[in-house]
Amino acid sequence: MAFARAVPVFLALLVPTLASAQQFPVFQQSLPIASLNREDLFNKSAYGRALRAQLSQKQKQLAAENNDLYTNLEREERELTALRKQITPEEFTPLAQAFDAKANEIRSRQRQKLADLNTQLERARFIFFRHSEAVIRDLMQESGILYVLDEQAILLSTGEGDITGDVIQRMDRLFADGALKVEDK
């Protein structure tokens, strides 16, 4: 008999608990949010690879130029050192000062070229991501995506909402069609 009285009391306590549990939102479908890996987009797309290849070629050219210049400076320095033993200090001092000024000017000019090259890289990345924004917006409209988050901002993910591959495919098509071009500056 005590058991018969306990069941209705238990049910009376359980029903409100179950009812309140149903008041919290339970998502039956995915939210219209996607993620994007910006580094993969830049590194794996044909357009990004072309930009990187162009800049890499410029870096190699600058490195070769630096190597030639510094090899010549080392040769001149050895010649000047050998000449030092043959001339007076009064004759040597202006030659040494001229060499130092020349070496400093060359180093300064080459540092500026490297800084300019780094600026070109940053500009190329900026332009790349500006072009990718249009592609991402189109994909968002077509797919009903409301938000695209940078993958680095996501703590946990199943990876199902990653649109990086789709954006790469679309950008590759635009690049192949000539709509995206690598500027040669």
Image (tube, rainbow, N blue to C red):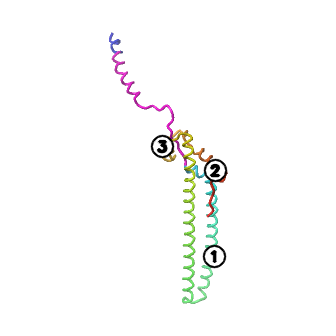
Percent position of residue 142, x then y: 57, 41
Of residues 184 and 165, the one drawn nearer to the viewer in this rendering: 184
Percent position of residue 70, x then y: 61, 73
Residue indicated by mark 1: 72
Was residue 155 drawn as part of the magenta stretch in this picture? no
Q: Do the residues labelled 1 and 2 touch (CB within 8 Å)?
A: no
Q: Nearer the viewer, mark 3 or mark 1?
A: 3
| Image side of residue 105 versus residue 177, left or right | left
Residue 113, relative to residue 158: is it above or below?
below
Tag 2: residue type?
Answer: Leu
Residue 124, located in which quarter of the rendered image?
bottom right
- Which badge, 3 or 1, is on the more N-terminal residue? 1
- Which badge, 1 or 2, is on the more N-terminal residue? 1
| Image side of residue 21 versus residue 41, left or right | left
Tag 1: residue type?
Answer: Asn
User: Which stretch appears magenta?
Assistant: 8-37
Percent position of residue 183, x then y: 62, 60
Residue 6, located in which quarter of the rendered image?
top left
Tag 3: residue type?
Answer: Leu
Mark 3 and mark 1: Cα distance apart in space: 53 Å
Residue indicated by mark 2: 174
Image quadrant containing the C terminus: bottom right
Residue indicated by mark 3: 155
